[in-house]
Amino acid sequence: VQLVESGGGLVQAGGSLRLSCAASGFTFDDYVIGWFRQASGKGREGISYISDGYLSDSGRKTYYEDAVKGRFTISIDNAENTVYLQMNNLKPEDTAIYSCAAARRLLIGYYSDWAAYDYWGQGTQVTVSS
């Protein structure tokens, strides 16, 4: 099982970045995929999630924490087993290491609980300058 993030970097406030999370080694549709971040000296924070393929007959659902709602967009390419996080209007407080994680058949109430995830990527640094 492998999750590989890419797309981090240095950007000015107000700018954009798109992170990618390429997954392999497991049945993609069975897993919730979450994006988390950890700023220096702070705890890990959940920011956005996409449900597994079984939550709804109308397809996978997306969720956002208040800190990023309206600025970040999570999306999925099932053919490529890749989840994206488009980050717009970035702020200095968004500076952190961003990681994606996968959890099999996780209940919605646990999406933000990083300890509930089974697999993690190595993380990618996002730095937003003021």
Image: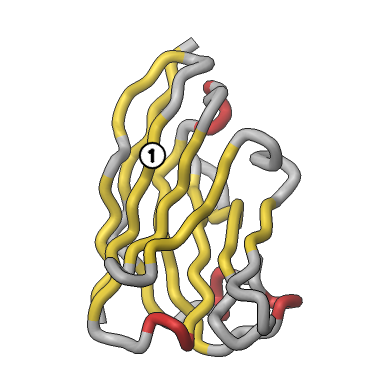
Left or right of residue 56, residue 14 in this image: left
- The residue drawn where x is 56% and y is 45% is 73
Considering only vertical position in the picture, is 105 above or below 98?
Answer: below
Label 1 residue SS: strand
Q: Quadrant of residue 62?
A: bottom right
Amino acid residing under circle 1: Arg
Considering only vertical position in the picture, is 79 above or below 87?
Answer: below
Considering only vertical position in the picture, is 44 above or below 3?
Answer: above
- The residue drawn where x is 42% and y is 48% is 98
Crowding at mark 1 (Cα within 10 Å: few <14, some 14-19, many 20+): some
Left or right of residue 53, residue 63 in this image: right
Residue 105 visible to the viewer: yes
Q: Return the x and y of residue 69 as percentages of the image width and height.
A: 70, 42
Q: Return the x and y of residue 88 as percentages of the image width and height.
A: 53, 29
Quarter of the image with the N terminus is: bottom left
Q: Nearer the viewer, residue 83 or 46?
A: 83
Q: Residue furthest top?
A: 130
Disc 1 designates what residue?
18
- The residue drawn where x is 49% and y is 69% is 33
Report the coloring of the rendering. secondary structure
Q: Return the x and y of residue 85 as percentages of the image width and height.
A: 46, 48
Residue 40 visible to the viewer: no
Q: How many marks?
A: 1
Left or right of residue 106, residue 126 in this image: left
Q: Return the x and y of residue 67 as percentages of the image width and height.
A: 69, 40
Q: Residue furthest front?
A: 58
- The residue drawn where x is 38% and y is 39% is 18
Q: Quadrant of residue 81?
A: bottom left
